Amino acid sequence: MTLTYWQIGKKINEHLLKNQRAKYGAQTIAIVATKLVDKFGRSFAERNIRRMMQFAEEFSDFSIVTSLMSQLSWTHFIQLFSLETTQQKLFYAKKISEERWSVRELRRQIERKAYERQEIAAVQTSLIETELQDSFKDPYFLDFLGLKDGYLEKDLELAIIKELENFILELGNGFTFVERQKRIILDGKDFYLDLLFFHRKLKRLVAIDLKLGEFHAGYKGQMELYLKWLNKHDRQEDENSPIGLILCAGKSTEQIELLEMHKENIMVAEYWTDLPPKEDLEKKLHQLLIETKHRIEQRKSLECCIINAEC
């Protein structure tokens, strides 16, 4: 029925209303809805007719609709109507298709700003490999851990292990837990990596290091050591090189850029153990997104100057 709804909406928009909202439009829609309800039932009530029109308008590319209709229900599409941009709609549509989100899970992901957080993380992932862009977020929401003020790094790790299922859901589709406190022996000394995961789609080991407080430059060397050891001793022949994710309570984007951590397959992201009210959350993420896009534009401009040898 989804395709039928799109075709009805398109026909009304283009042939009856001619892509305009004339004064007689409301009457026309009401008349069409009445006739369709009489013939086909309540699914074609005026409210739904307007949704069909919105559907055809917001998803105007027929090829996109046909590619999505086997994975997305009509109720899925209705949830996407509230999103502001085409990029947001297509991002969530792709996630529904790939990760088989229910409508309830889609609402949850929209409320938890999955798109905005993926966009913020993209400033780092795009520098490593484009295929990573949909696999990481920034920040990560760890409000489900129930941590109290004054928690230690050990408390954070234990809470994640206790809530491992929720932590994997927050990481996203494709992550598989491998080990905690991964033992790494170098020069007869023991080092321990907090968490080790494997990403099936990326075919990579993902080393996660948990840190309290702000990011420090010294964390880079520690993660480099872990990744080189994993690459030498744990990586299988058919796997891609490991990637590192340093989770901190706060981070300095400028510091991270100057350290060029992407060259070592290392990402840094914040984690939030408490979420602000919805309005404050939206403002904070919006500001982070603006700053991120600004930095991307600055980097592109600099790269262009270097290539053309003129600034």
Image (cartoon, rainbow, N blue to C red):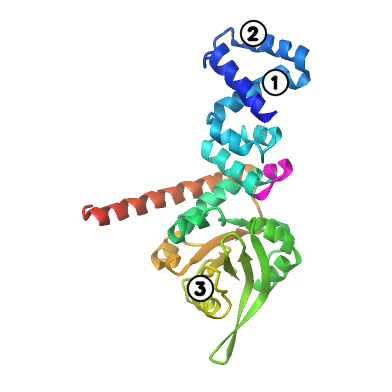
Relative vertical location of residue 187 with respect to residue 182 in this rendering, above or below: below
**Image position, residue 214 (x, y; %):** 53, 66
The number of callouts visible is 3
Question: What is the secondary structure assignment of the residue under circle 2?
Answer: helix
Report, in whole angstroms, how far the alpha carbon at label 2 lies from the one at label 3. Answer: 65 Å
Question: What is the secondary structure assignment of the residue under circle 3?
Answer: helix
**Image position, residue 86 (x, y; %):** 53, 36
According to the picture, the residue beneath numbered tag 3 turns out to be 219
In this rendered view, identify the residue nearer to me: 68 or 303: 68
According to the picture, the residue beneath numbered tag 2 turns out to be 27
- Which of pointers 2 and 3 lies earlier in the amino acid sequence? 2
Report, in whole angstroms, how far the alpha carbon at label 3 lies from the one at label 1. Answer: 55 Å
Asked if residue 78 lies left or right of residue 43, the reply is left
Kindly report which numbered mark, 2 or 3, lies closer to the viewer in this rendering. Answer: 2
Amino acid bearing label 3: Tyr
User: Magenta segment range?
Assistant: 99-107
In this rendered view, identify the residue nearer to me: 159 or 40: 40
Q: Which mark is residue 47?
A: 1
- Which of pointers 1 and 2 lies earlier in the amino acid sequence? 2
